[in-house]
Structure formats: structure tokens, C-alpha cells
Amino acid sequence: MESAPTLDDLPEVLAVRQVARRGEERLAIPETVAGRVEEQFMGDPGPQLGCQVQDALGARSSMDVPPEARVAKGDMAMADPFRHFAVEQLADGVWAAIHRIGPPAPDAWSISNSGIVDLGGLTLVFDTFMTAAAATELKSAAEGLTGRPPEIVVLSHGHNDHAWGSSQFPDATIVSSARARAALVAEGPAEVEAYRDVLQERLAFWTAAVDGDDALAREGAPFFLPYWQGLANSLPTLQLRFPDLAIEGRLDIHGTARRVEITTVGQAHTDGDLVMVLTDERIAFCGDLLFVGCHPYLGDGDLGGLRRALALLEACGAHQFVPGHGPVGRAGELATLAAYLDDLQRLATVADEVAIPEAYRSWALRRFFAANLEFTAGPRTAMDS
Ligand SMILES: [Zn+2]
């Protein structure tokens, strides 16, 4: 009887890719292996994100690093040579690729963050941006920083601004949660078509919004105009690339220098999110479970699941958190987002229209606040983006 594959099979799968790249033999991951790995992970016990490390080292808080130090680090990152994002080194072999919004790079086409990890003998990319241009630049950055092309791509979830760049990594093994893969396969092609249909109308709207009378739209334009400009560049030739490995539960990937722990968290920001934690380096790549300095997008989410995911991240022992949007944060940012959810809950029962609370008034993406309030209050609504 054929035995089911185990986690230990993954290096073999990756070795197949490496062999293929060297031109010795062209092989692909058999569909059946991906399917069986997925099956094996179904029903695993609830996720635990490196809690043993936290136990050993003690909890850390955002107070460890003063805010002014964080600003200085971000400014340094802006001096790097990339058009679509700024690269920020978080530890030896670990980098965040942080999106630019508005001046001084108004034509930057990433609106979300990615990561690059040199595992030692393996290069990993976390999230792929939305456009071919940004994804190609990310691939070049990963190769330049690690000396090898990315062999593994991990997708935090299936939203287009994180996943549509995946087609620029044809030789990499792409990993996502089983639910994110299912959503990409089921809904991705229709979503691409829908975006093609509204492209010109949305481009015209956001172009006019830059200096228009609508203050809320004007504030959102530095985010959404590049989003639609990037789409205008990408959509004509966009081909979706679906994940090869669909996991549910926990997947550790070991290189010779370091390892990453990938854990699915179920329904939170979307139906199928995952996080990637480097316990030794105390770094967590959060995807859109965390937004820093901007209102989160909640419209496809589950508020209870999001709270549970934030608590898991808080307990993982990391002290640098790469959000899906905004600059790299500390643990305090998790608490801030949890407080935001609490405030939404409280305000949603008071009135339909509420001013943005003082604590969040400086955040970007203000147009999300009213929609978040409505989402918290009642039936789901689709937010206009
Ligand atoms: Zn998202």
C-alpha cells in the first residue's frame, strides 16, 4: 500500500525543482502529491505559532523599540534602488519589501508588502504583489540579495494585491492555504475578467480624484490610482498561477541557515489566511491579518477569526511584524488593531454614521472606516476599491 507523504517529502519536491532548473531533468510536482499533502494536513490541531520560543524568552512588547527608531529605519529603506517597493533588512538573511504610496514614487505599482528569506540553499518569497512589474522586480531583488532565484513562494492569502504576481515565478513551488488555493481557482479567472471590465472607469475615477472635491477620495488616490495603473499595465497579459502546495495546519521549511514555520489560521482576513514565523529571528510575516498605520480591509473577513489570529500572532514571540500594508510594526500594532476592532464593535451599535475616532484619524485609507463600521454592524457589504 502506498504510504501518504509526510512533511519530509517537501525537500524532495523542492529538489525536483532544483534539478529541473539545472537542466538535468525536467520534472514537475505531481498533482497527486500536492493533493495528498493537503489531505494530510486537514484536521490538524489548532495552530501554535512558536509559543515555545515565547515561553523561553518571555513576551516582548512594542515598547522595546522607540517610535523614532522605527521612523529612521523606514527612511533608510526609502533610499534603496527599487521602483515599486523599499527593501528593509530585518535580520541576517531576512528582508521585507515594503510598498511605496504616492510621492516620491507615484508610479510604484505595489500596494502591499512582501518578504524575502534566504533559508540557506533555498530562497523564499512571501507574497508576490499584484502586478507583473512589481513581481519581476521582487524576483530580481530576491536573486540579488540571496544569490539564487526564488524556489519557494508563500502566499498569505488569495487577494489579488498579494497573489496576482505569482505568474512571474513559474519555476518556484507556490504554497498557500487550501482555502486560498480553492478561492483562487474558483474565483480568480472571473475576478480578472471583472477587473478588465471596470478598468477604464476606475482609472478615470481615481485620476480625477487626485485633485477633486471629494476629500475622502483625494486621500485614497495615492493608494488606489497606482493600484489601477498597475492593473492597467498587468491585466492585458495577466495569467493566474495557482499554488502547487495547498496546506491546512502547519508546514515548516528548513534551509541550511534558518527555517520558517507556516501556519494556516482559518477564516480571519479572508476564508484562508496563513502566517509565516521565523522563531529564531523573532519575525512574523502577517499578510493582511495586520495593517499598520492604515485602516484595514475587513470586507471578506471574519471578525472573530481575525481577533483569534491577532492573539496567535501576539503569542508567537516575534518582535518584528511585517504587515500586509504599512511599515514593519512591533507587537503593539497587534493590540492597536484589536482595539480598532473593539471600537468598531462599540461604535457600530451607536449610530450608522460615526466620525473616525481620534486615535485612527491620521491613518491612511480613511475610506475603509465607514465600510468597516457597516461590515461590523450588519450583513456583509462589498467595499468599493
Ligand atoms: Zn487582503
Image: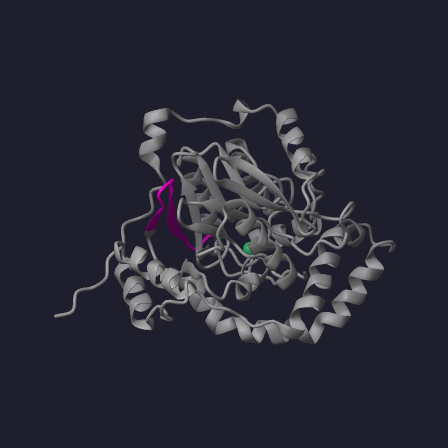
Left or right position of 323 against 52? right
Q: Quadrant of the N terminus?
A: bottom left
Which image quadrant shows ligand 1? bottom right
Q: Residue at x 60, y 60 (%)?
A: 130
Answer yes or no: is residue 345 visible: no
Q: Residue at x 62, y 50 (%)?
A: 373
Q: Position of residue 117 (x, y in %)?
A: 47, 45
Q: Position of residue 354 (x, y in %)?
A: 69, 45
Task: Please check the rendered image and state whether residue 264 is part of the magenta-colored stretch, yes or no.
Answer: yes
Q: Quadrant of the C terminus?
A: bottom right
Look at the image and give the residue range highlighted in magenta: 251-268
- Report the front residue among 368 and 203: 203
Left or right position of 158 against 198? left
Q: Residue at x 41, y 59 (%)?
A: 175
Answer yes or no: is residue 67 visible: yes
- Report the front residue among 2 and 219: 2
Task: Please check the rendered image and state whether residue 120 is part of the magenta-colored stretch, yes or no.
Answer: no
